[in-house]
Image (cartoon, helix red, strand yellow):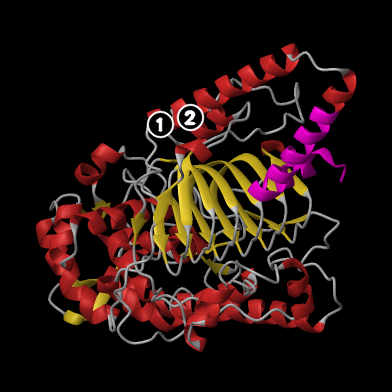
Amino acid sequence: MSDPMEPSTSKSDPNPIISPITLLHPRREPFEHGLLPIQKLIFTDPLQALIPLKQKLASSSSSSTHRVNSDALADALQISSEHARLILDTLASVLHSEPDRLVNAHPDDVDSVGSDLSDLILFLYIQSYKRLLPRSHKDSAAVADVWPSTSAFDGYLSALSPLQLVRSNTRRFMPSQADEEAHQLSYLQKHLANIISLLSEPVEGEGEESLVLTMEGFEHLGFLIQFGDKGSEGIPLSQAAPFFANSDPDMPAVPVPASQVLDWLLENIASSLEHITDKISAKENGPQGGSDQDVAMADASSSSARASPSARNCCFIEGVSKSSYVKQASDLKHSSVKVINCHDSVIYILAPLRYATIYGCSDATVVLGAVGKAVRVEHCERVHVIIAAKRVCIANCRECLFFLGVNQRPLVVGDNHKLQVAPYNTFYSQLEEHMTEVGIQATMNRWDEPLALGAVDPHDSLSHPAGVSDAQAESAAQLDPDQFTNFLIPNWFEGESAGSTKDNPFPLPDAYLKSQLRNQKNLSEIKQILREAPLEENRKRELSCALHVYFKDWLYASGNIRQLYCLQGD
């Protein structure tokens, strides 16, 4: 991070206007992984709704710590304890302050720890944010080449209204990171005055008209914004602000007029928006193929697998088609991964991560090593996802199968159809080390407790038909144990990345374990029968050919044919 900013005006100016030196960015995590489609959290006027709510929660929370548990939250919002607990778990996954006790609290201790009141209020405020609409792909022919022309859902889709068809159609192109960042900054620009007023305190004796912001209150803005391109972990937001940067660490910092903080932040936001707009314009008007590390890549060709690093802690894997793609911990210097528009492929990301997103993929298998914060799988069709993670959210997917090792209940939101969940079914040599690094517990797997929320996402900018806002999303069914199989990850780098994991670290439920043992026993018996069969040589060849034919049919029918891409040279 650059040196703290210094005022550009004389010290006698009580309200200096600061020229921004380091660009301000929105924190993406709350907007990408922290929005919940719970109708009672969507406020028409967030400020007017949250002022009395904050007062009520402050009176019910601990006077010394101002922390809120799920019972107090459920009572204040008039929601179920299940939804209140979901709010705390989700907030913990997107908090900016890693030392906060809620981030690493054991599930049994979440209520006793509670959430910081200011962080909770900011989390509730942004629940009214609406995402940027996905834009149509500039090359519809390219999309047609990778998306299947027929689907089991074609008959279903033909019966939908045009509005429902738009919502159900997964053939949509994800907005670029720069587009989304500009959209988030514009939202913050519009709502910053309200947000700061919720964090501010009135000056004693001067009433509500005169508000000040303490350094502690200002630090809570780190939930939504950060300075610089390297992330905000470990760097107090106040070090970037001229009115707090040189404060004596041994003395309480003098509170600052809220209006001064607002003016300074608005100027920084305007400067950042101008920079992003110029970048987007240059990208759109410049020569094709020009690189922009913070804008999502164009689709990769069907014969190549390409990844794009981002300057802000995210790696993009996009456009992989009819091939396999492998990323290990030594390949990734980023805390987040986005797998976008990949088709007919197998993607292995065998690394410890904080966040992961899988978007717009079809007929693929995606293996995520260990994700310590949150995974979001959205707009995917006929995809097998194998995940070891703390939490996962599944949105607007069809005919997908999830093999899960998750410490929190899987969240199912939006317009989903024919989803299945199953226990985690694989391992690689460093899996347990990676799980320990990001805080995933193998002894706790809640794969079989999916929580379905709204079928309509209020954060989508599309208008919604009346009367369906409270409709519950279609949940996920459990995979038949007889259909459960282990997934084998090839050990390409044996000797280079030796680890201690020798088997699936997540214990299998009895029904799945019995099925697995039964399949192993049947396989051994068949092998024994074939070895001992008194067949002539030509009969053995016929039998071998028949087995190969049936095996090939099974590979295609089950989708496991894509695993053979691993055996092809890139």
Q: Which residue is mark 2?
A: 515
In the rendered view, tell whether residue 391 sits above or below residue 191.
above
> Residue 537: percent from the left, percent from the top?
89, 19
Residue at horizontal 47%, vertical 58%?
394
- Residue 425 lies left or right of residue 532; in this view the side is left
Residue assigned mark 1: 511
* Residue under the point 84% across and 55% down: 304
**x and y, in percent, of residue 24 in the image:** 55, 69
Toward which corner of the image does residue 257 lie, by quadrant?
A: bottom left
Q: Residue at x 41, y 52 (%)?
A: 477
Amino acid type at mark 2: Ser
Question: Which quadrant holds residue 124?
Answer: bottom left
Q: Do tag 1 and tag 2 residues touch (Cβ < 8 Å)?
A: yes
The span picked out in magenta is 542-570
The amino acid type, in three-letter code, at marker 1 is: Ala
- Asked whether residue 332 appears in the rendered view, the answer is no
Residue 499 painted magenta: no
Quadrant of the snapshot with the N terminus: bottom right
User: Dot 2: within a 10 Å radius of its alpha carbon, few (fewer than 14), some, or many (20 or more) residues?
Assistant: some
